Image: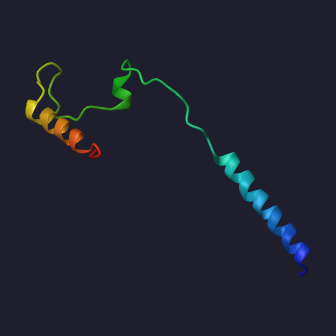
Amino acid sequence: MKVEIARGLFLVGALAVASLAVAAWEPSRMQVVSSAHGDANCPLPRVAKAPGVTKPDNDLLLFMFGMAQGMRPQS
């Protein structure tokens, strides 16, 4: 096979792969998730308590704050 034919086939193959990649690529869209249909997005487990009954765990919030502070680079 001649070099020119091989180059042509390689070019056609590369263009085919690139066109398939462009056709398959779908950019992310900006969309707002509303809480009106919250049941469809994230269903609650069966053992979940009724809203308003639970209160936040202050130790867990303090732990999460400490972990976030520890992730900062030392400067």
Q: Is residue 1 above or below residue 56?
A: below
Q: Considering the image in quadrants, where does the N terminus appear?
A: bottom right
Measured along the vertical axis of the image, is residue 47 above or below residue 8?
above
In percent of the image, x 55 and y 36: which residue is there?
Answer: 28
Q: Residue sitting at 82 percent across and 62 percent down?
A: 12
Q: Position of residue 67 (x, y in %)?
A: 20, 42
> Residue 68 versus residue 47: which sits nearer the camera?
68
Q: Residue at x 70, y 46 (%)?
A: 23
| Left or right, residue 10 beside residue 5 | left
Residue placed furthest toward the front: 75
Q: Residue furthest bottom?
A: 1
Specify how the rendered protein is coloured.
Answer: rainbow
Image spot of residue 15 (x, y percent)? 78, 57
Residue 66 picture location, percent across and down: 17, 39
Left or right of 10? Residue 73 is left
Q: Residue at x 11, y 21 (%)?
A: 53
Q: Nearer the viewer, residue 38 or 16?
A: 16
Q: How many marks?
A: 0
In the image, residue 38 lies at what x, y percent?
35, 24
Quarter of the image where one finds residue 60:
top left
Residue 42 is left or right of residue 61, and the answer is right
Q: Which part of the image, by quadrant, shows the C terminus?
A: top left
